[in-house]
Image: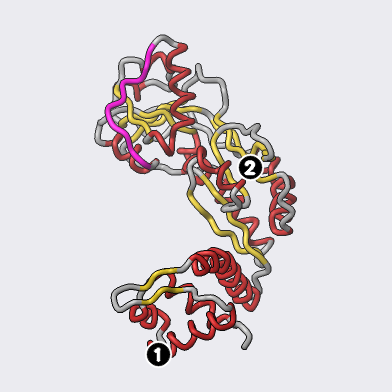
Amino acid sequence: MSLDLRHLRAFDTLARELHFGRASESLRIAQPALTKTIQQLEDHIGAPLLRRSTRRVELTEAGRVFLTEISNLSAQIDLAVERARKASRGVRGELRVAYTDFAINGSLPVFLREFNAAHRDIHLDLIFMPTIHQHEAILQHRIDIGFLYGVSDQQPISSLTFDENDYVAVLPENHPLAARDHLTLQDLRDEKFVFGTGDSWIIFRQQVFAKCRARGFFPDISLEATSSDGIFALVIVGAGIAIYSSCIGNMPRQGIAIRQLVDMEDKLPITAVWERGNTSEELNTFLRFLRRRRPLLAEPRCSVPASGGSDLR
């Protein structure tokens, strides 16, 4: 007897359920048929994979080893099936792209739309991922390319500056400081602050905190939020003010005023990162398109227009 996918699926399901009834139900086959399939597999291997009793089912040592080996195979088969289905729809390949709040609220959506229009045979799987996790995900091959906040010099990761924006203050529209055309970080020292939560925003927080310390104060944080929308909502209700990227100009919201921080001359960079040794054809296609389009993306950089009133500036 030769092994086929049916034997591997049956054992994989049974080894995880450790119950013939639940496994047969999951596989949608009769329990006697499952028992026969497992017996055929054990006969072919020449060793018992399971210990059976009236009360429980357990893996033998051979069963544990076999499960570990076929788990990778099952994942590869599932991937092959999905890729075949995409190929039937005219999709040549897939690229897993990670992004942060700052990236997706800046010029990245425009770039991805243009790439989709030019390369409809490459499916983009977009994944939100904080900056701090993207390097690890690249090295573990869970993503192909990421767009993160800050710069990257970690080996063996390659990087390319994708976008640059200014630092801005985000205030309730009726805040006294909203009457000014622009602000300095020093102007905010006595304010309550709203920040993103530590894990997702840790690198941005560290850099902003360092700039505040250089001016002799530390932000008095009143509340934290997990997302940009949460930060803006807290600002609108008066929980505090926030420091953000000028890409917020792409997301107009009522109830807030945006003022450029003129004493924060450093730019807020968005960097594309990928593994240097990744020879994926889809990634190379993406990088070629990125390098061609990058000068054009830099021209309409998000900015904060100066104007009167308490609307977006």
Q: Which residues are magenta?
A: 217-226
Q: Nearer the viewer, residue 100 or 15?
A: 15
Residue at the image position 55 percent from the left and 49 percent from the top: 98
Q: Residue furthest top?
A: 216
Q: Say which residue label 2 marks.
A: 273
Vertical placement of residue 157 versus 280, above or below: above
Secondary structure state at the residue bearing disc 2: strand
Callout count: 2
Q: Say which residue label 1 marks.
A: 32
Residue at the image position 72 percent from the left and 44 percent from the top: 276
Vertical placement of residue 28 versus 99, above or below: below
Q: Is residue 169 left or right of residue 264?
A: left
Q: Nearer the viewer, residue 138 or 260?
A: 138
5 within the magenta span: no
Secondary structure state at the residue bearing disc 1: helix
Q: For mark 1, does the 10 Å Cα neighbourhood hold few (<14), some (14 to 19), or many (20 or more) residues?
A: few
Q: Which mark is residue 83?
A: none
Q: Is residue 108 left or right of residue 53?
A: right
218 within the magenta span: yes
Residue at the image position 35 percent from the left and 25 percent from the top: 178
Q: Where residue 302 appears, x then y in whole percent?
A: 54, 37
Tag 2 and tag 1, C-beta contact below 8 Å: no
Instruction: Give residue 27's quadrant in the image.
Output: bottom left
Vertical placement of residue 102 versus 29, above or below: above
Q: State the quadrant of the N terminus.
A: bottom right
Name the N-terminal-most of marks 2 and 1.
Answer: 1
Q: For mark 2, does the 10 Å Cα neighbourhood hold few (<14), some (14 to 19), or many (20 or more) residues?
A: many
Q: Where residue 106 appears, x then y in whole percent?
A: 53, 42
